[in-house]
Every structure is written in structure tokens, then in C-alpha cells.
């Protein structure tokens, strides 16, 4: 049995309903001040998106108490913060799993097998789109595009790439995560960070793992290599 956790319901969301403990709130406020300091005076509200990633790294989703904290520290209304939090799909409205699996079923990935991957992973986990397992281990999302068409079909877990997937390889990867095994993304860190760990990175706090693993691969660099071999360059703007 699976469940879609909703703020205000029992289960995973319950721990995020009340106020932050004094220790947690003090820590978050210190981080928020660091985020705000990156922006010019008078433009602190530009810090809202990384701040939302910060509170999501704490609660596993953008909880009401996180929205309230962001609103208070930026002098915004709850409606203004909620409007941003509900506009961007990376911000979850109920707790994501420790490993948030996103299967791309946009045009290229779909024709390369993304739909079959989605069906296989959904059947294996018993989850539908935007649902989280009862144990909080896995959540599943049907992604519009993972921005990695050169490696289609692609699955992302906690925003890390798993390229050139098949139904069998995707199910095997999810099974290993369910068993608590370490899994290595195709590109990026040597082991997969948790959802909350990567959310803190998206808030702007580096984890020291930026240079781990492979970055851009051959498929991404092929066009550049061909251009260099043929001496092709971008047209230069003519001086007037």
C-alpha cells in the first residue's frame, strides 16, 4: 500500500506541521542570513528560491512552517511565498522520499523508451505520479524533461542523472535504493546524495562533491569535438 502524503495529514507530514524547535529555527535563520547576504541591499527577496530549497532540505518538502519562516524573514506575505513555492515543480507540496525518482517521458525520452521505463518503475514501486512510499524511502514523479536529451531515455534521482536507461536498469536501480545500497549516478557524485542533502546544495551550500565523478560525457561534447576538428567557430559580430 502506498500513500500520497499531504500537509496536515498523519504520517511523514506530521513532523513538519508544528513550529521548528528553537535550535532548528536558529540554525535555519543563520543559513537564511547567509543566503540573503549574497544579494544587493534592497533586493533580498531575490533570495526566496534558495531559501525555499533550504526549508525543503529540512522538511523534505515546502512545509507551511517553512513558508512562514521565509515570509517573515523577507517581509513577504504567505500568499507571495506560496505563489513561488507552487509555481516551480522542484518544490514539493508534500514530503518527497529519501530518493525522489523522476522518469522523463517527454518527446525524445518517450520514443526512446521512457514510457516503458515509467510503467516498469510504477509497477515495481506501486506508486503513481507524485506519490511517496509509506516508509518514505522512494517517491516517484513523471518528469516533463530532464534536460539530458543526448542521453535519452533518462531518469533522475534527487536531480542526479541516470543516463541511457532501460526498464530493467531503472527497476534494478530503484530496488537497490529500496534495499539501502549505495548507487552511483551516471554523471556527478560517486554515490547518490539523499533528497534533503541535494536540496541543501541547491540552497547554495556546497557539499564538497562538485569534482566527483564524470561531468560532461562524450554525447554532450560530440558537437564541440566535431566543430574543433573542422575549424568551425561561431560567427563574429561585424563592427559598425
Image (cartoon, rainbow, N blue to C red):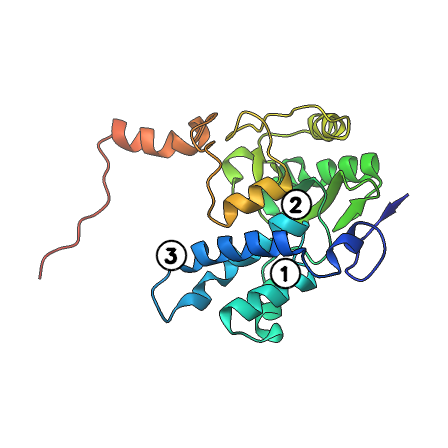
Pinpoint residue 60: horizontal percent, then vertical percent: 67, 49
Q: Residues within 10 Å of mark 1 (few under 14, many from 20)?
A: many
Q: Considering only vertical position in the picture, is 125 above or below 225?
A: below
Identity of the residue drawn at 73% across and 37% down:
116
Q: Considering only vertical position in the picture, is 164 above or below 48?
A: above
Q: Residues within 10 Å of mark 3 (few under 14, many from 20)?
A: few
Foreground residue among 91 and 233: 91
Q: In the rendered image, is residue 129 in sight?
A: no
Q: Considering only vertical position in the picture, is 184 above or below 13?
A: above
Pinpoint residue 83: horizontal percent, then vertical percent: 60, 70
Foreground tag (1 vs 2): 1
Foreground residue among 178 and 59: 59
Q: Residues within 10 Å of mark 2 (few under 14, many from 20)?
A: many
Identity of the residue drawn at 8% across and 62% down:
240
Q: Which comes sooner in the sequence, label 2 or label 3?
A: 3
Q: Which comes sooner in the sequence, label 1 or label 2?
A: 1
The numbered mark at residue 38 is 3
Label 2 sits on residue: 105
Identity of the residue drawn at 53% across and 58% down:
29
The numbered mark at residue 208 is none
Label 1 sits on residue: 66
User: Quadrant location of residue 66?
Assistant: bottom right
Left or right: 117 in relation to 125: left
The residues bearing labels 3 and 1 have C-alpha atoms spaced at a distance of: 20 Å
Judging from the image, what secondary structure is the residue with disc 3 in? loop
Left or right: 115 in relation to 39: right
Pinpoint residue 3: horizontal percent, then vertical percent: 85, 49
Amino acid at each position: 500500500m502506498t500513500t500520497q502524503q499531504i500537509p496536515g495529514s498523519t504520517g511523514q507530514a506530521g513532523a513538519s506541521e508544528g513550529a521548528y524547535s528553537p535550535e532548528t529555527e536558529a540554525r535555519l535563520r543563520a543559513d537564511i542570513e547567509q543566503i540573503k547576504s549574497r544579494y544587493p541591499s534592497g533586493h533580498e527577496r531575490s533570495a526566496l528560491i534558495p531559501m525555499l530549497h533550504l526549508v525543503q532540505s529540512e522538511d523534505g518538502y515546502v512545509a507551511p512552517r517553512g513558508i512562514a519562516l521565509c515570509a517573515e524573514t523577507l517581509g513577504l506575505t504567505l500568499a507571495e511565498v506560496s505563489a513561488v513555492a507552487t509555481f516551480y515543480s522542484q518544490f514539493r507540496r508534500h514530503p518527497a522520499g529519501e530518493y525522489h525518482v523522476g522518469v522523463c517521458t517527454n518527446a525524445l525520452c518517450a520514443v526512446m523508451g521512457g514510457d516503458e521505463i515509467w510503467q516498469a518503475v510504477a509497477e515495481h514501486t506501486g506508486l503513481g505520479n507524485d506519490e511517496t512510499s509509506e516508509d518514505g524511502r522512494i517517491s516517484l514523479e513523471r518528469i516533463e524533461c530532464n534536460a539530458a536529451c543526448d542521453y535519452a531515455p533518462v531518469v533522475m534521482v534527487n536531480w542526479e542523472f541516470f543516463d541511457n536507461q532501460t526498464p530493467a536498469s531503472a527497476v534494478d536501480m530503484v530496488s537497490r535504493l529500496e534495499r539501502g545500497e549505495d548507487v552511483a549516478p551516471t554523471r556527478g557524485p560517486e554515490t547518490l546524495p539523499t533528497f534533503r542533502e541535494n536540496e541543501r546544495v541547491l540552497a547554495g551550500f556546497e557539499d564538497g562533491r562538485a569534482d566527483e565523478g564524470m561531468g560532461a560525457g562524450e554525447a554532450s561534447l560530440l558537437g564541440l569535438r566535431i566543430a574543433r576538428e573542422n575549424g568551425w567557430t561561431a560567427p563574429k559580430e561585424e563592427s559598425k
